[in-house]
Structures are given as C-alpha cells and as structure tokens.
Amino acid sequence: MKTAVPLLALWLTACQAPQPLDFRPDPPSDRDGVTLEQAREAALRLWPGQTAENVRALLGRPDETSASVYGQATPAPWDGTAWTYRWERYGVTEKRLVVILVILPDGPRVNNWEWYDF
C-alpha cells in the first residue's frame, strides 16, 4: 500500500491536460537600437542623392559594408558601396535592407535601396 499512493499520485499527474503553450513569435531583434518597425518607417524617408550621414541618422550604423563597381553593363559604370542592415529572429536573419551609395567627390550619396526577406 505504501507504494500504491505515490504511483497513484504520479498517474493522476500524468492524466492532467497539458497547459497550452504561448506560440506568439518574438519580434525581430533590434539592431543598433533600431527596431524593424522603426526601420520600415525610416526607409520611407530615404531618397536618391541623400548623404551617407542622413542614412546613418535614420538607420544607425550598418551591420555590413562592401564596395563594388556597379553598372558594369552600362556605358558609365560607377564605384559604390553597399550598406547592409539585418534584423534577426531566433539567431536567423529575417529581414535585410541594403542601401547602395554611389561614391562622389563630395561623399557617398544614396543611389537605391531594397528590402530582402529570408
């Protein structure tokens, strides 16, 4: 009888309905203090010809940068740099914003930008 009581308690515990799990996904992580929602709003204020300083003021420091020659298939290729901003969820990149800046004598200027989903 001594062993029957603990076994009965274990059996009753196992028969209880499991509690529902909260499956609300976490929002993408902030990067440099800028949330994905803030970045989407800020991207609405980007425009071609904007300075690199303006981009940094809107979006913060980029996560990655790279330099390349753009427009090589055109008569007037140009030097530029790509600023990449990433937002992650669960350690995996979810959204990326890439801003392409043309290198001009008075400093880099926005040429174009594009969002990417992963």
Image (spheres, rainbow, N blue to C red):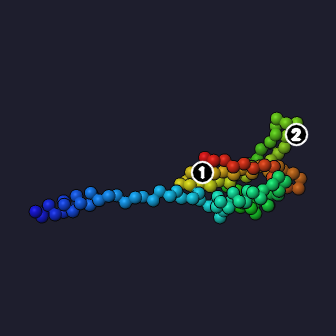
Q: Residue at x 63, y 47 (%)?
A: 117
Q: Residue at x 59, y 57 (%)?
A: 28
Looking at the rendering, in which quadrant would you find the N terminus?
bottom left
Residue bearing mark 1: 93
SS at mark 2 in the image: loop
Looking at the picture, tell me which residue is in the foreground, 12 or 62: 12
Q: Residue at x 12, y 64 (%)?
A: 2
Quadrant of res 11? bottom left
Q: Is residue 25 rendered to the left or right of residue 8?
A: right
SS at mark 1 in the image: strand
Label 1 environment density (alpha carbons within 10 Å; few <14, some 14–19, many ≥20): some
Instruction: Residue 76: give its label.
Output: 2
Across and down, in percent, residue 76 comes to: 88, 39
Label 2 environment density (alpha carbons within 10 Å; few <14, some 14–19, many ≥20): few
Q: Tags 1 and 2 in contact by the CB under 8 Å rule?
A: no
Q: Is residue 7 rendered to the left or right of residue 76?
A: left
Across and down, in percent, residue 36 comes to: 64, 58
Q: Residue at x 42, y 58 (%)?
A: 21
Quadrant of res 32? bottom right
Instruction: Name the amino acid, label 2.
Output: Ala
Instruction: Name the amino acid, label 1.
Output: Thr
- Residue furthest left in the image: 1
